[in-house]
């Protein structure tokens, strides 16, 4: 009775290995540039043509790509906003539209945490993560922002 | 997608609702959200006029407060006993039941939804969750556990139905978690996740387990219906015997 209802499946470090993700932190992490994604994410030529205004609609035939933006979330380090690109309902790209930038420490965190989050979002898609438990203040804000984007997906 | 999602900022954090079929009328969720805000107004230690602030100042008695205040204080007493003093509403030196209110509120929000007929949903209160049923037929909820040592990463995934998942970690709300027995910050674990049947208790158990450190492993093993997964400060992890490890 006590021992049968919960299970731990896999580890995300395993998924990181599978995806072979490499981080390329931008020296100006406070800009709203697109973040790198792992090389094994299926290349989708239509994705690059996707409007990024949050109301993207794919005109041509082929995979349906659209973008959704999460709410801006206030974190300990400042505002965070995440944008997702979905191709046929699967997350193919995560972009940080807004990141804290007013202190050196923030930039360091951005460089470290954002590529990780990008990775994790893609991993979450493959690992079927419905929600996240835990609360370090940096990931917390990102996760919430991510979740708000998923709310609109 | 048949999921209905809602995000609500309340109690200094974010509540995320993920409702799956069978769906309930929108008014049900509106009532739940309104209740959360009323609860915040009652229990917030940051509001000068909240029942808890007035009670802590001695301006009123429990009898002069909302009925939920007595309920929470009783729960705090039980938790103090169950955790051997490792969870206390007085850990900071003054009355502050915040450590139990959020989990209790998530648990009650889920109960309100279930009573209205919502059998499958997830309520996430700032990283502590109550899951009902499953996200879709034949699949359990998959809950990523944030890696406390690598911000933005997930350290493992816990799957299950009808469960509460609570995590206490080094950096939540920026403050160290104090050991009520010594008044000193707890060290040893980077984070600990407790899985159990109710978030009213699992949330406080996670706080107590964090205070206990490695000793929490035996404590949780002895708690019927509860399991734990911990990441130690040195990066090593441990898991109680009932969490089945599977997958790639």
Image: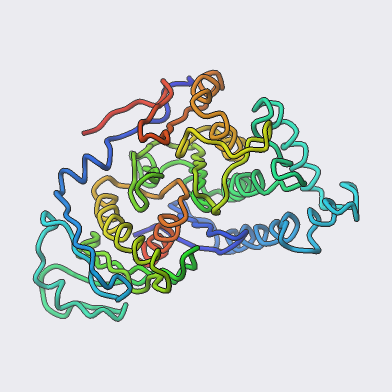
- Position above or below: A138 against B191: below
Residue at 22%, 80% in the rendered image: A51
Indicate whether B34 appears above or below A15.
below
What percent of the width, then of the height, locates residue B146?
Answer: 39, 46
Q: In which quadrant is the C terminus of chain B drawn?
A: top left
Q: Locate residue A144: give its quadrant.
A: bottom left
- Location of residue B128 in the rendering, given as x and y in whole percent from the top left corner: 51, 46
Q: Which of A27 and A75 lies nearest the eye of the viewer? A: A27
Residue with the most extreme front position: A104
Q: Residue at x 59, y 40 (%)?
A: B185
Q: Quadrant location of the N terminus of chain B?
A: bottom left
Q: Would you place residue A131 above or below residue A45 in this image?
A: above
Q: Is residue A32 left or right of residue A59?
A: right
The residue located at (72%, 41%) in the rendering is B89
Q: Residue at x 24, y 60 (%)?
A: A91
| Left-right relation of A23 to A135 | left
Q: Is residue A22 left or right of residue B97?
A: left
Location of residue A20 in the rendering, given as x and y in whole percent from the top left corner: 14, 49
Residue B116 seen in the current view: no
The mark tally for this picture is 0
Quarter of image, res B158: top left
Q: Residue A4, position in %: x, y?
A: 41, 23
Drawn side of residue B192 relative to residue B56, left or right: left
């Amino acid at each position: 009775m006590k021992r049968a209802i919960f299970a731990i499946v896999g580890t995300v470090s395993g998924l990181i290995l599978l995806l072979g993700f490499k981080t390329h932190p931008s020296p100006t992490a406070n800009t709203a540039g697109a973040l790198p994604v792992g090389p094994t994410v299926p290349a989708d030529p239509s994705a690059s043509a996707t409007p990024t205004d949050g109301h993207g609609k794919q005109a041509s035939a082929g995979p349906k790509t659209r973008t959704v933006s999460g709410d801006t979330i206030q974190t300990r380090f400042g505002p965070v906003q995440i944008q997702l690109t979905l191709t046929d309902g699967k997350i193919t790209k995560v972009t940080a539209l807004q990141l804290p930038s007013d202190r050196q420490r923030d930039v360091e965190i951005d460089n470290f945490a954002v590529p990780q989050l990008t990775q994790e979002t893609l991993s979450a898609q493959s690992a079927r993560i419905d929600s996240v438990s835990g609360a370090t203040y940096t990931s917390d804000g990102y996760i919430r922002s991510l979740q708000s984007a998923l709310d609109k997906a | 997608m048949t999921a209905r999602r809602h995000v609500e900022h309340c109690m200094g954090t974010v509540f995320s609702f993920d409702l799956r079929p069978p769906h309930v009328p929108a008014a049900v969720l509106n009532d739940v959200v309104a209740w959360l805000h009323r609860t915040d107004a009652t229990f917030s230690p940051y509001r000068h006029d909240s029942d808890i602030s007035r009670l802590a100042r001695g301006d009123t008695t429990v009898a002069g407060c909302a009925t939920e205040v007595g309920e929470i204080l009783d729960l705090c007493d039980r938790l103090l006993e169950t955790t051997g003093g490792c969870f206390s509403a007085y850990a900071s030196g003054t009355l502050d039941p915040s450590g139990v209110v959020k989990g209790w509120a998530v648990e009650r929000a889920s109960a309100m939804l279930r009573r209205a007929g919502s059998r499958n949903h997830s309520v996430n209160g700032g990283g502590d969750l109550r899951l009902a049923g499953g996200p879709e037929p034949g699949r359990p909820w998959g809950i990523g556990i944030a890696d406390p040592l690598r911000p933005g990463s997930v350290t493992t995934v816990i799957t299950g139905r009808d469960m509460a998942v609570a995590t206490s970690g080094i950096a939540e709300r920026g403050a160290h978690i104090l050991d009520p027995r010594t008044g000193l910050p707890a060290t040893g674990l980077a984070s600990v996740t407790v899985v159990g049947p109710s978030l009213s208790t699992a949330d406080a158990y996670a706080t107590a387990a964090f205070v206990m450190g490695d000793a929490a492993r035996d404590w949780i093993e002895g708690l019927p219906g509860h399991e734990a997964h911990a990441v130690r400060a040195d990066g090593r992890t441990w898991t109680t015997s009932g969490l089945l490890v599977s997958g790639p």
